[in-house]
Image (tube, rainbow, N blue to C red):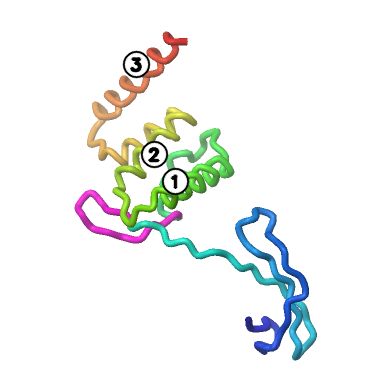
Amino acid sequence: MRCPYCHSTNNKVIDSRPSREANAIRRRRECLNCSRRFTTYEQVEETMPLIVKKDGRREPYQRTKISEGIKKACEKRPVSIDAIEDFLDDLEREMLEGNQREIPSTWIGEKVMAKLREWDDVAYVRFASVYRHFTDATDFMKEIRHLLESRQAAESKE
């Protein structure tokens, strides 16, 4: 480990403990060259599966790409950033637990759609319009009609 102050690699660990989220080890270090202290975090590097796009291309998983799409759909809607981050954490955990090397982008898209439908109808329709490539107002109307019908069916069951 290189000291951030003098760039020496000569240092010792003073204290070691789990981070608050318990997903990393926090290490307090002291540089033996300049005597300054600094903190490092050690964390397991998890290999996310490749994403298989609809056209067959494969690309690395990008949390920010999914996050930005969800945030755009939820813009000016009552969905918190914390809820989005928690969903993304759960999604990644599910992807890793599946032990698959590749995951279809449609699987991720459907998970996002289901969560948005739970959170907010407007955010759901916004995301659906991009995800399902709506071409005109009739596509919006069909999706809204389908959404309302499923809501009414769920309410009648209660």
Q: Which residues are magenta?
A: 51-63
> Which is more N-terminal, label 3 or label 1?
1
The extreme right residue here reads 35
Residue at 68% in and 59% down:
19
Q: Secondary structure at mark 2?
A: helix
Q: CA distance from mark 1 to mark 3?
A: 30 Å
Q: Pointer 3: what residue?
A: 149
The quadrant holding residue 146 is top left
Instruction: Check disc 3 and give the amino acid type.
Output: Glu
Q: Residue visible at 60% across and 57% down? A: 23
Label 1 with label 2: CB-CB less than 8 Å: yes
Q: Which mark is residue 94?
A: 1
Residue 53 rendering spot, x and y as whole percentages: 26, 52
Q: Which residue is mark 2?
A: 111
Residue kind at label 1, given as amino acid type = Glu
Label 1 element class: helix
Q: Position of residue 100 (x, y in %)?
A: 35, 53
Q: Residues within 10 Å of mark 1 (few under 14, many from 20)?
A: few
| Residue 79 drawn above or below residue 92 | above
Q: Tell me the CA gap for discs 1 and 2.
A: 11 Å
Q: Nearer the viewer, mark 2 or mark 3?
A: 2
Q: Which residue: 34% across, 23% down?
A: 144
